[in-house]
Amino acid sequence: MYQQINEQFTAASRQFADTAAQVNRLALDNAEKVFGLQLAAIEQNVNAAFTFWGELANTRDFDGLKTVWPKGVQVARENLERTISTSQEVFGATVKTNEAIGQIAKGQIEAATAAATEQAKTVAEKVVKAAAKK
């Protein structure tokens, strides 16, 4: 009897470890993707800002400032749009990852329920057979 309990515990532990590894892999993949998206957006924003600041530094008079100022507004608008777009991509990727993790959890719960039901049926059949013999 103890051996059967040990085997069940070992199987459950192995299944838990496998599931945890799958979830961790999904979470790490998502973190890597999110980090890459955000880093790319920051790089583009910084490059655009430094380009604008370079043009602004070369401006020597008020007329030059009038010319450069709309470019600065355009750069700020593009940076904001890029940031919002990246945030939406990050949110979408995270939602997909969480859905995948949810599916793994759902599958584990269904498998555990099926195993428990099968085990309960087996025990019930043994009890009925034992009662029928008496």
Image (cartoon, rainbow, N blue to C red):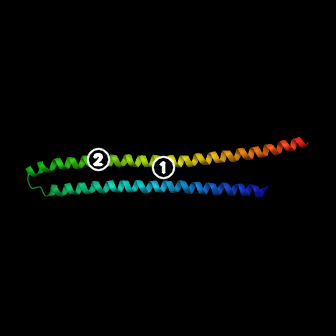
Residue 129 point in image, percent of width and height:
85, 43
Quadrant including the C terminus: top right
Kind of residue sitting beneath label 2: Leu
Rendered residue at 60%/47% (across/down): 107
Neighbor class of circle 2 (other Cα within 10 Å; few <14, some 14-19, many 20+) is few
Q: Which residue is drawn at 54% across and 46% down?
A: 102
Q: Which of marks 1 and 2 is in front?
A: 1
Q: What label does residue 97 carry, if any?
A: 1
Residue in front for this viewpoint, 55 or 121: 121
Residue at point 71% right, 44% down?
117
Depth check: 56 or 101 in front? 101
Mark 1 and mark 2: Cα distance apart in space = 26 Å
Q: Quadrant of the N terminus?
A: bottom right
Q: In which quarter of the image is residue 11?
A: bottom right
Q: Which amino acid does label 1 sit on?
A: Thr
Task: Give the labeled residue for mark 2.
Answer: 80
**Side (left or right) of 17 relative to 36:** right
Q: Where is residue 53 in the image (x, y as percent from the top left)?
A: 19, 56
Q: Is mark 1 on a helix, strand or loop?
A: helix
x, y percent for residue 73: 20, 47
